[in-house]
Amino acid sequence: MTISQIQDNIVEEFSVFDDWMDKYNLLIDMGKDIPRIDQKFKTNDHLIEGCQSKVWLRPEFRDDRVYFTADSDAIITKGIAGLLIKVLSGRTPDEIISADLYFIDRIGLRQNLSPTRSNGLLSMIRQMKLYAMAFKATGR
């Protein structure tokens, strides 16, 4: 599936619900399914700066693709990380760098997050793109 197809599926999943409490529950469920970061990588090196809660994100580069694992001490934030991983993990660095993450606005996520969680979302996106840029530049 392409990044756009995955985003369209996410938009469709969220469109089933009108109430944001239901959408938050879906987001929480998505957080339960994310590839978990190994405990040994829950270090400051993998901690995302700018998040209200603790979020650890680890990239791995193999077969010319970037794969992410993550965890958070907050269930909503873990769900947000899960959404981003669903869209960006397993992609080439170029795909990640150039990705237009339109699903965020289409599902109303940005508008329904607190300012600090919204900053965290942007920090996660920025860090994922920075990892992709680094892998593109080094090839490893």
Image (cartoon, rainbow, N blue to C red):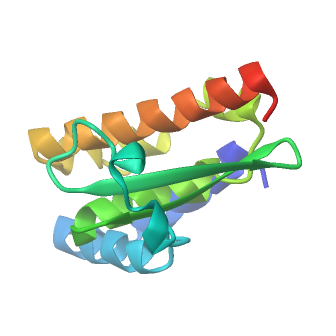
Check the image and name the residue furthest to the right: 63
Q: Which of 90 and 57 is in front in this view?
A: 57
The picture places residue 27, in percent across and down from the top left corner, at 34, 69
Q: Which residue is drawn at 45% across and 52% down?
A: 57
Image height check: is 108 above or below 39? above
Decide if residue 40 is on the left or right side of residue 23.
Answer: right
Q: Nearer the viewer, residue 42 or 89?
A: 42
Quarter of the image with the N terminus in it: bottom right
The picture places residue 137, in percent across and down from the top left corner, at 73, 19
Task: Determine which quarter of the picture holds residue 64.
Answer: top right
How many tags in the picture? 0
**Can residue 46 be seen from the camera position used here?**
yes
**Can residue 11 be seen from the camera position used here?**
no
Q: Residue at x 64, y 26 (%)?
A: 134
The picture places residue 118, in percent across and down from the top left corner, at 22, 40
Image height check: is 127 above or below 5? above
Q: Residue at x 64, y 24 (%)?
A: 133
